[in-house]
Image (tube, rainbow, N blue to C red):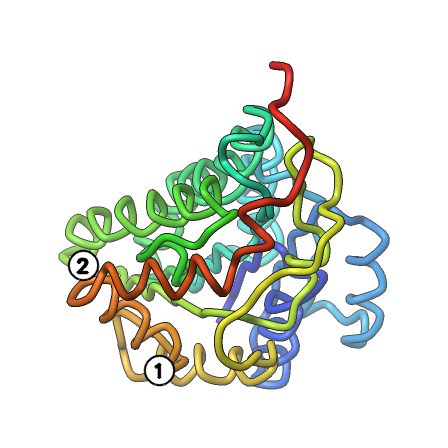
Amino acid sequence: MVTLITGAASGLGWAMAQYWYRAGHHLVLADIDTQALLLRKTELGADDRVHTVTVDVTRTADLERLVRETENIFGRLDLLVNNAGITHRSPATDTHPDVFRKVMAVDWQGPVELTQLALPLLEQSRGSIICIGSMAGWMPVPGRAGYCAAKSALSQFFEVLRLELEPKGIHVLMVYPSFLDTPIEQNALGADGKRAQHARSTIGGMSSADDMAKMIDHALARGKRWLMPEPVSRVGSLLWRIAPAFYLRTVRRKFASDLHAGPGNPTP
């Protein structure tokens, strides 16, 4: 089994890499952080089952090189994991357009382009695609307008793509976590594109990346199309559909600090 994971040097990507390495997978670990990738390869044992590639998922040339190296090194691809992501914590009215462009490029455009490039290999292996979405793609989360939009676009694109790929034997698993203890939130962008200075707001408990990796593997093994692993995701999604006014009141209260964070109106 050859598995390619983006955003593999930290957080959920690293948890999945460790889990599948122990399961015997050959791994292609892609990340924008070269030094972190080298460290991760060393931690796994630096053997020939692990290949690392420094990649900016917003650059087409990097994605082309990633797929090319995967084929050159291992000759096949069985599992593509679109995990790399970025978020922001800032009111939509105050957020510089460049922040929205970056979030959309990383969270939507990157996975779409990489998947298109990897499809010939996945068709040969009749492989699988995992996309790490978010409950924010299903329901509004204050202070995350760009992130919500990107994850919603990710979900809709891959749901349509699923219809096209299943007849070809390619399986798609969409994963919708709620709040994970990973660096994505520690590196969240603020309204001006710099690192957000205020702590994130949450609802419900915080899940670990290791537990999530195990749940993802089990869902993949069972051939599931969707994984909403935590009660807060399932309940929140249901509330947004059957009691939207109650949902809006709740998140407005819980995320009040996110609605008022950041500088004033940016200058484009």
Label 2 crowd (10 A; few <14 / some 14-19 / many >=20): few
**To which residue does mark 1 refer?**
221
Which residue is rendered at x = 48% and y = 55% of the image? Answer: 82
Which residue is rendered at x = 15% and y = 52% of the image? Answer: 163
Q: What element does badge 1 sit on?
A: helix
Task: Say whether residue 250 is left or right of residue 182.
Answer: left
| Picture disc at residue 54 | none
Residue 234 drawn at (x, y percent): 30, 75
Camera-side residue: 157 or 102? 102
Label 1 crowd (10 A; few <14 / some 14-19 / many >=20): few
Residue 140: in sight, yes or no?
yes
Q: Indicate the quadrant containing the C terminus: top left, top right, bottom left or bottom right.
A: top right
Where residue 249 sits, quadrant-wise, is: bottom left
Camera-side residue: 264 or 136? 264
Where residue 263 sits, quadrant-wise, is: top right
For marks 1 and 2, the one nearer the N-term is 2
Question: Rounded to the nearest whole Å, what is the CA distance between mark 1 and mark 2?
Answer: 16 Å
| Picture disc at residue 166 | 2
Count up the numbered dots: 2
Camera-side residue: 125 or 267? 267
Which residue is rendered at x = 57% and y = 48% of the image? Answer: 87
Residue 186 drawn at (x, y percent): 72, 58
Q: Amino acid at mark 2?
A: Glu
Task: Say whether residue 128 is left or right of residue 6.
Answer: left
Where residue 109 sits, quadrant-wise, is: top left
Residue 130: in sight, yes or no?
no
Task: Find the residue positioned furthest to the top.
Answer: 268
Q: Is residue 196 above or below residue 168?
A: above
Camera-side residue: 170 or 213? 213
Residue 147 drawn at (x, y percent): 48, 46
